[in-house]
Amino acid sequence: MSIDSLHRTPDALPDSGGGTPDARQLRAVLLAVSLALMAVVASVSGLNVAQTHLAVEFGASQTTVLWIINIYTLALAALLLPLGAVGDRLGRRPVLIAGLLVFGAASAVAGLAGSAAVMIGARVAAGTGAAMIMPITLAVITSTFPAEQRGRAVGVWTGVAGGGGVLGMFLSALLVDVADWRLLFVLPVALVVAALAMTLKSVPDSRERAPRSFDTVGALLSVVAVTGLVFALQEGPERGWTVPVTLVGLAVGLAAAVAFVAWELHRRDAALLDVRLFRERGLAGGSLTLLVVFGVQAGIAVVLFPFFQAVLGWSGLLSTLAMMPMAVLMMAASGLAPRMAARIGARSTTAVGVALAALGLALMALFVSVDGGYPSVLAGLLAMGAGMGLSMTPSTEAITGSLPRAAQGVASALNDVTREFGTALGVAVLGALLATGYRSAIGTRLDGIPPDAADTAREGIANAVEAAPATGDHAQALVHAARQSFVDGWQQTMWIGTAVMGALLVHVVLRGPKDTAPLEADGAAGPAGAS
């Protein structure tokens, strides 16, 4: 069976249940899904700025606080593929409405939670609702917008998905600073109410008519695989990579992933995700690009926030504000990418974006310094934002365009899983590289520092700054040593990131998605005709 024939199976035909929306309705649809997506991505990082408040409010340990934060992402990532497929079958509009209701109710409960247990339960429910919302928002775009307008709509979606997290973190930090941490949940609830009202009014329904049974085994295996792998990546940096719980999570995730691929190959056309399609450049190249780009973006955040707070001494609010230029430029570049792709091709646009992102990493590695402060990293941040925006949109289109129109929920879920897994991987890998570089650099700068304080300083820059006042006359020297060591570790991490982006650039140039003109949408073809 050829790959092309996989795109035109007569057993899975879309049922839109209505005519083609006019321009006004399309704008309303795009606004509705953008608001829904913003609520989801803002909730991923929003609670990071309230860790201390959570610990005090609930009398919770650091481990419990991290579970409150991470369990949302874990539930979201694990359920994306199954719930995306459910949306294809039951109808994208009703699943989106259900997701908004679940997410909104769970966010309200979280804001009123009186204990850590209630908060964790609410976050799991919110993650479940988010897993219904996130893939459906993109699937609504790819199944509703005509081919000539789809690229621009996907550009808006990728801009919100990429920059919304930083914007959400800034608004969260603002609320924590000027009001109360519980008000963090007002923003997602307000966004959900607005998105729900617009969805009920403007979003059309579309669904798959498929005689084959739902791939329950594949859905369960995907949940176990993603849960195990993301859990290991979240726990490894905190508990250690060799502790039993991390190793078990990694082993279970890898075993389930292998079983998932084998089962999907067995199911063939009735699979939850036809893994044979990864032989296509569009699906494989788009997925790899998003994996690396989002991994680097998440890793940059891990590096930047300690730099702003521990090295420059900034508040959490000011630190998130410092990230805004990158986020704004990323969102702008995401909107520009479809026009650029129409002129020079999707592969060339992606290559330019990856090259700019690599340049941004190199600029930060070259010019970052303790004395240089924020200006020493600003140029790199701007280049990173532009590069990520230009590369994300064509990569997302390559993924959604590689699966049939009737499977756009699954295609969108795959896109989202790739982003979430890349984020977890980037935080784990770049965070570990930074910690290793810091420990290596500070080891030679602790001469004369009291042994207990020196041991504390080796654990991290925040530990060093906290321990410094107890060292008397050595306090200033210890803080300076920690800050300079952090910058040294930063530079090593950025150069490794540059090398990774360079390798990705070579892959995109040689094996990126072919530049093909968009195909007019039909009942069975992929939404953009990507190959």
Image (cartoon, rainbow, N blue to C red):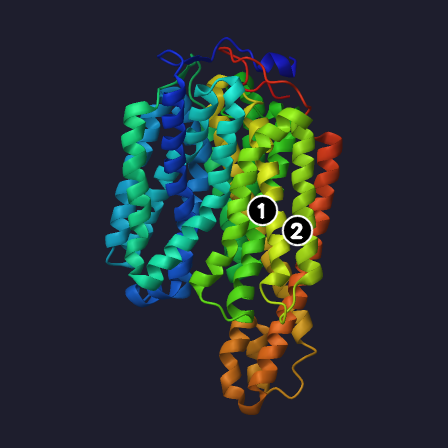
Q: Which three-letter amino acid code belongs to the residue tagged 2?
A: Gly
- Residue drawn at the location 70% of the way across and 43% of the way down: 355
Q: Is residue 229 visible?
A: no
- Residue drawn at the location 39% of the way across and 58% of the way down: 173
Is disc 2 in contact with disc 1, using a CB cutoff of under 8 Å?
yes
Q: Position of residue 501 (x, y in %)?
A: 69, 45
Residue toward you, 79 or 140: 140
Q: Position of residue 417 (x, y in %)?
A: 51, 37
Up-down: is 100 above or below 42? above
The answer to whether residue 13 is left or right of residue 363 is left
Which residue matches tag 1? 385
- Residue drawn at the location 34% of the way across and 43% of the way down: 126
The answer to whether residue 497 is left or right of residue 220 is right
Q: Residues within 10 Å of mark 2 (few under 14, many from 20)?
A: many
- Residue drawn at the location 66% of the way across and 65% of the way down: 489
Q: Which quadrant: the C terminus? A: top right
Q: Which three-letter amino acid code belongs to the residue tagged 1?
A: Gly
- Quadrant in the rendering for residue 430: bottom right
Disc 2/disc 1 C-alpha distance (Å): 8 Å
The answer to whether residue 242 is left or right of residue 146 is right
Up-down: is 140 above or below 365? above
Up-down: is 329 above or below 69? above
The answer to whether residue 23 is left or right of residue 345 is left
Q: Is residue 316 visible?
A: yes
Where residue 458 is drawn, which disc sits there?
none
Which residue matches tag 2? 360
Up-down: is 12 above or below 452? above
Hey, which residue is sitting farthest bottom in the picture? 473
